[in-house]
Amino acid sequence: MTQPFLNSLLFAVMTTVFATVGGMAVFWGAVSASKTRGWGESILVGGAVGCLLMPPFLHAGAWWKVGMGLALPVATIPFGAMVLSLQLWPVVFLVLLAASRRLEPSLLEAARIFLPPRRIWNRIVLPMLLPALCLASAVVFILALNHFIVPTTFQTPVQIADVYVMFSSLYDTRAALLQSLPIWLISMATLALAARLAACGEMGRTNRHASLHAGFAFRGLPIPGGRVLWRGLGGVILLASLLPGLGGLISWVIPKHDEALRTYMTPLLGAVRLALPQFGASLVYAAGSALFASIFGVAIWRAMRVVASRRGGTAIADGKVAWLVEWILATPFVLSGLFLGILLIGASQAAGAWAWWQGTWLMGLAALAVRFVWIPFKAASVAHAQIQSDLLDAAKVFRLSSAATFKAVEWPAMKPSLATAAWMVYVLALWDVETLVLIYPAGGEPVSLRLFQLLHYGYDAQVGVLSLGLVAMGLLPGLALGFIRYAGFHRPSPQGHKMIAKR
């Protein structure tokens, strides 16, 4: 084993430990709230989503400045693992949050009668959350093992960085794939084992149709260690995850005390003008990948439902085939985007003159859509599970076709979740670096790549201004969607009820 490969394993293990502990601490802080969902839990959930959506290069660059200012050993594996864990703990927190809301309330109500609170946590709650915790930790491990930006920023020699350097130097697809084969095998084995463990752990022990917006079934139980401890620890972790990035973003664009505002802003505005083509390229990549990933994700989910209905059962939609399809779709999402770029370049080289897509925007759009197609697919599956079973049963009784059921009952209920999933794909593609770093066409460099390069040369003010523009581009669709829903333009469609009533 080479030293970069060992560094990758150590980096991934330390990141997993830090992120798992942090995610569990924030989770205990969330469940220590009152019996109904309050503002404290909403703040933690919103902060967790904000940590996930923060650009990795912005987060790493801010912590590099903080570490250098405090004279910390920044160019070490533990410090880099700590920085990455502050961005990945929301994976553990959100998975545990979703799993806790699917627990069977009747089991916990019965346990309150016969068991003291501590035994309820030790014998019922924690064992039932263990599969979800294992799945979240495995996802964090795979993401850390395949991460490219944070180890590169903190000058940590890892395997994925060696693959990038070797391929960009020699352009040898076969050698690059062989060198990355251990990372592939470990990632795929970990993902398959975690998915199987989570699937086995959910059988018969969770309420599948419980609302994700419902309160915790175990609210009101005494929390081990005390509520104040977990709330304070969760708040500290959240602040440590958000403040350096946001503070660095603000400080980079504020002029120093000895600089005139006009003198300071002139080069910044010039940098923005020069980066307008890059902003346009980022918009094309983000919007196009969100559109294609949403269409393909819903189409794959819909095809599975149609095949299952024609066979007269749900064996395909809920059985081993569904697990295999979801595992295949999730694999590009958790693996490094560099692998997708290398595979597409290798396919173009093998196709020769038939590779008309090589050197075009379609190559980048295809890579981003394939990488993020799992998000709309999973959103469609989760949203369909929340549909009231009475509506689906009524559609079967009145013999509505599969297309009519989808149009009248399923699609109106799934639109909000799919819109949120499309926005997530848009933001992730907007800030993507590793997927496009090898395959972007001439004149198609996105802003994220420009920022990643500027961070290595100390252009802090330019990085701050361009990052503000990128953050604004990412927030606009979400703000527009929230305004439309708040203003009442988006209302649940009554078509399903009307069609069933007419029949």
Image (spheres, rainbow, N blue to C red):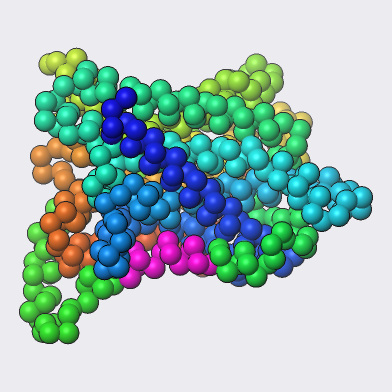
User: Residue 6: which quarter of the image?
Assistant: top left
Q: Left or right: where does residue 93 sit relative to residue 239?
A: right
Which residue corresponds to the image point at 27% horizontal and 59% vertical from the top-left? Answer: 64
Q: Position of residue 372 (x, y in %)?
A: 39, 38
Foreground residue among 84 and 337: 84
- Magenta span contains residue 241: yes
Q: Where does the C terminus fall, quadrant-wise?
A: top right
Depth order, front residue of 434/225: 225
Residue 289 visible (yes or no): no
Residue 403 percent location from the top left of the image: 57, 31
- Quarter of the image with the N terminus is top left
Tell me the residue at 56%/31% (across/down).
194
Question: Do we see residue 148 in this rendering?
Answer: yes
- Image x and y of residue 3, in percent: 28, 32
Where does the magenta region start and end? Answer: 235-247
Give the answer, above or below, for where 438 lies relative to 62: above
Q: Main secondary structure of the magenta part?
A: helix
Residue ID at (7%, 79%): 263
Instruction: Give the residue at x 44% y 40%.
Output: 13
As for residue 239 lying within the magenta part, the answer is yes
Q: In the figure, is residue 273 to the left or right of 74? A: left
